[in-house]
Amino acid sequence: MIETLQSLSQEKVATNFESIPFAPEERLAPAAAVALFNELPSSTASSVSSFIHSEEFYRRACSSLAVLGCRKQEHGLSFKRMYFEVQAEDLLQQTITLPRGIAENIFTLKLPACSRDFPLDKVCSQLPNLNAIDVRYDLATSSHSPLESVPRALSVASNLVSLTLQDSNLTDNDVATMFDNGSCRNDTILNLNLSHNNITSTGLAVIVKAFLAPPESALCSLELMGNKIESEGGSVLGESLATNESLLSLNLRLNNLGDLGGSALLDSLWKNATLRYLNLSGNSLASSSANSLVKMLESNDSLSLEAVIITSNPFTEEDEEAIKSCDRCFLDVRGGSSPERQEMFLGKSLMPF
């Protein structure tokens, strides 16, 4: 079979594309651009990334790397982002220097098993478009090793909006090292997730000072599930939330607030007009917290709360009945005083945690 001039041309362009790259969508007809993408080997993706934006090309590139099992939604619903971000995750296990073609396409940096002395700042300084960091520090590494690269990383990642450091055995000292130094970007970070660590009320006070107390605070979501925050933490958070105007979602599930800490936090919310979602499940809340919740819901005319999740707390039947009478927002008190009285009270809307 004699090849056509068009097919020969496509083959030649594909062969030389890495040395003479161009933007196919701008220079070729749509059908010809698609044909060229089909000819290009997926191994050229890193070196020509600034010229190729075809999702089909990067879907094929992802297939060649066997990363299609990854969740595309974790990479901005983009095969191109998924290809480069997964590739970066693999490369950073051997080196801290990324090729430019990869570095400029990293928006979310995920490191699922990172040593505590990993130079996070040196990696972040190479990523001009980085907006999210998701690091899990290896529990096998020394818990006494400082995390001094984290504040330096925050200072160089000028576009950062999301920071996740969960399941990392972080202590109050670690929190102080990372955030109690004036370098954290409290005017850009919108989401902070420090769930499943060993943070107590002492560490929480540092977080509040850095991310909630400043008037320029932009933090919208704070995840502190599964830590060791005690009753003092409820007072610290409550004092801040009485004036904070940025936080929309607060998750304190599975901490140690107790009835005193829960009521102190809820008492403060009668002044708050921005918080929409609150999870206090599994915190040993009791009658004082139930009374504070009911009072807050009845007295705050500017209330924005849409959901309060307070499951697995030892409320009495009277507590549950009082909470049941409120219809200002969605209230979930399942797992209270007895299995027979596990109820779900639906008001305006539900946002699950």
Image (cartoon, grey):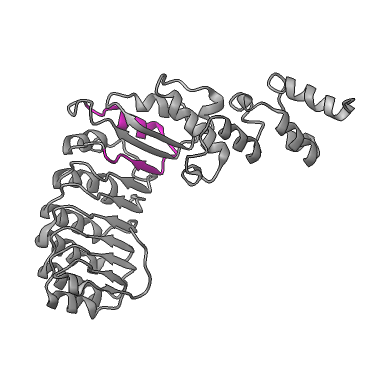
Residue 201 percent across, percent down from the top left: 14, 47
Say if 345 sits above or below 30 in the image: below
Q: Residue at x 17, y 39 (%)?
A: 172
Q: Nearer the viewer, residue 33 or 288?
A: 33
Say if 37 sits above or below 244 in the image: above
Residue 314 percent across, percent down from the top left: 12, 66
Residue 138 horizontal side relative to residue 19, left or right: left
How many circles with numbers are drawn on the protein? 0
**Residue extent of the magenta highlight:** 146-167
Residue 206 horizontal side relative to residue 350, left or right: left
> Does the stretch in magenta take in 165?
yes
Say if 151 sits above or below 204 in the image: above
Residue 83 percent across, percent down from the top left: 54, 34
Residue 157 horizontal side relative to residue 46, left or right: left
Q: Residue at x 48, y 37 (%)?
A: 107
Say if 39 sits above or below 161 in the image: above
The outermost residue toward the bottom is 325
Q: Quadrant of residue 42?
A: top right
Task: Please state, as top left, top right, bottom left or bottom right, where the N terminus lies in the image.
Answer: top right
User: Can you see residue 116?
Assistant: yes
User: Can you see residue 23?
Assistant: no
Q: Nearer the viewer, residue 42 or 299?
A: 42
Task: Please state, as top left, top right, bottom left or bottom right, where the C terminus lies in the image.
Answer: bottom left
Residue 181 percent across, percent down from the top left: 25, 35
Q: Residue at x 72, y 23 (%)?
A: 17
> Does the stretch in magenta take in 241?
no
